[in-house]
Amino acid sequence: MSVLIRVGKQKAILRAGSWLAADPRLERRLNAQMRRWFQTTGGPALVDDDQEGAVAREIARQLGGRVLLQVRSRSPSHARAYIRHRQLAFDFADAL
């Protein structure tokens, strides 16, 4: 499954849990925003059968963009792409 969005005049593709764009700054911005969203909210509902679409719609909304095209997959493996985003990250640098 892949989703194409437009943010301003630039386009990006969300595929397998990662954003790809011709502009490296936009790509970093999209991936960073997606990480923040997952860390603060947990991302889309686990029962949502369209994980990639839900992620793309929300990130596009947050950045003032819009979804242009979505190619859906029937494979159940597409939901596994977001497991790593749901993992919590702990910083123990200041623990002592």
Image (spheres, helix red, strand yellow):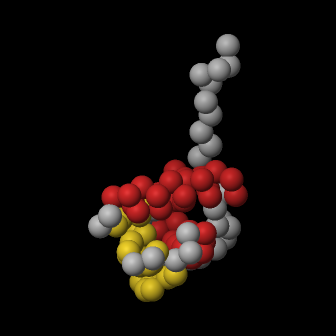
Residue ranking furthest to the left: 22
- Quadrant holding the C terminus: top right
Name the side, left or right, on which 40 lies relative to 50. Answer: right
Q: Quadrant of residue 75?
A: bottom left
- Seen as rendered, the residue at the extreme top is 96
Percent across and percent down for residue 53 are 53, 76
Q: Nearer the viewer, residue 54 or 10?
A: 10
Name the spot of residue 63 as percent of width and height, x first: 55, 69
Residue 48's x, y, as percent? 64, 74
Instruction: Give the quarter of the image for residue 16.
Output: bottom left
Is residue 66 placed above or below 44 in the rendered structure?
below
Indicate whether 6 appears above or below 43.
below
Front residue of 23/86: it is 23
Percent position (x, y) of residue 79?
52, 66
Q: Is residue 24 left or right of residue 75?
A: left
Judging depth in this view, the residue of 60 and 89 nearest the camera is 60
Most foreground residue, 7 or 59: 7
Q: Residue at x 29, y 67 (%)?
A: 22
Q: Kindly tell me whether residue 33 is visible in this rendering.
A: yes
The quarter of the image holding the N terminus is bottom left
Question: Quick check: can you spot residue 72?
Answer: no
